[in-house]
Amino acid sequence: MTIDKMLGIDYPIIVAPMFLISNTAMIKAALDNGITAAFPALNYRTDDELKKAIEEIKAYTNKPFGVNLIVNQSNPKYKGQLDILIEKKVAFIITSLGNPKEVIERCRPVGIKVFCDVVDLTYAKKVESLGADAVIAVNSEAGGHAGNIKPNDLISLLKANLSIPIISAGGVAKAAHLNEVMGLGAAGVSVGTIFIASEEAPVSQDYKQAMIDYGAKDIVRTTKLSGSALTVINTPYVQALGTEANWLERLMNKNKRLKKYIKMIIAFRGMKAVEKAAFGATYKTLWCAGPSIEYVKSVRPMKEIVKDLTTGYTARTTG
């Protein structure tokens, strides 16, 4: 089943949850234009702020939207955030960076769908066995925490081995791309990068201008921000900083007992660095983006960006 049929929307598109970027204005704009969207729970510092964001969107529309939840031990807010998402009955939860067993078990009885980020077949089969409603196949063209397998290869691999829907994440910026991945058997797409330069996005004008000025060739991976490989724009600051593991990460990889705590430190430091760059005029430009930056030519309202994705889209008649 494609996700437009699963969720009752016009097009099988999710605006991907982007750390520090996704906000209620972006969610509303997506829902107004026939697609859905999700935001990271961690974009809100307190449980009250998270509740208010969900309530604001629900007061605006009854259309379905989701929330991304980090389910590993690097997120000390996980339990409280899950309680809120279930209490407020969001349409779907996207799980990342951990075991989604508890999320699936608690969401199924109340009708909340669970989509799980995966980067390979092994983990995809695991979450399918746990009862996930769909996988989000994060490929090598994704922004943020990208996978290592090319989009078409990952879709084909998962399609041949899974019975649940596959949502492709990475490399989609226009209707032709959407048609291509849907033609391979994907149930939908998760799209992030091209929405960073939207009028609704809350990031700085410097960040939005960088989305226009740089291209796919300028995207590099760094492990300096979260302990996991993250795609960023290769600004002069990133070039000076380097992209290789630092002493803290090397210690983490050598000492399994300390790994949990060191990973939390790295993640916290990385979040703070990205936050400073995203919202302030600073030479320390740690701007996340994927190769789809190539298709960003101006700052536009989300309505126009969605139009690029949907004009010329040919809906699948089966599945």
Image (tube, rainbow, N blue to C red):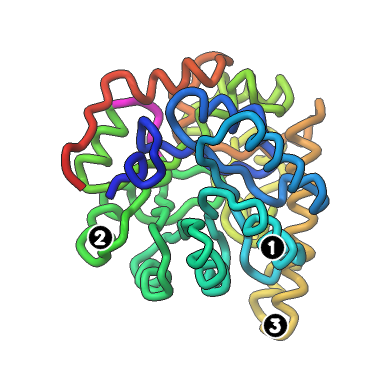
Q: Which residues are magenta?
A: 171-175
- Residue 247 can be seen in this image: no
Q: Is residue 136 visible?
A: yes
Q: Is residue 154 above or below residue 291?
A: below
Q: At 64% from the left edge and 22% from the top edge, which residue is drawn?
A: 200
Q: Nearer the viewer, mark 1 or mark 2?
A: 1
**Horizontal side of residue 103 vs 117, given as left or right:** right
- Residue 205: x, y in percent? 71, 20
Give the amino acid at mark 1.
Asp
- The x and y percentages for residue 260 are 71, 75
Q: Residue 302: x and y, percent? A: 53, 21
Give the residue at x 70% y 64%. 78
Q: Dot 2 lies on which element?
A: helix
Q: Tell me the mark number nearer the camera, choosing from 3 and 2.
A: 2
The amino acid beneath tag 3 is Asn
The residue where tag 3 is placed is: 255
Disc 1 to disc 2: CB gap under 8 Å: no
The reply to whether callout 3 and callout 1 are in contact (CB within 8 Å) is no
Q: Is residue 316 left or right of residue 155?
A: left
Q: Which residue is mark 1?
A: 83
Above-or-below relation of 88 to 98 = above
Q: What residue did someone put label 2 on?
A: 157
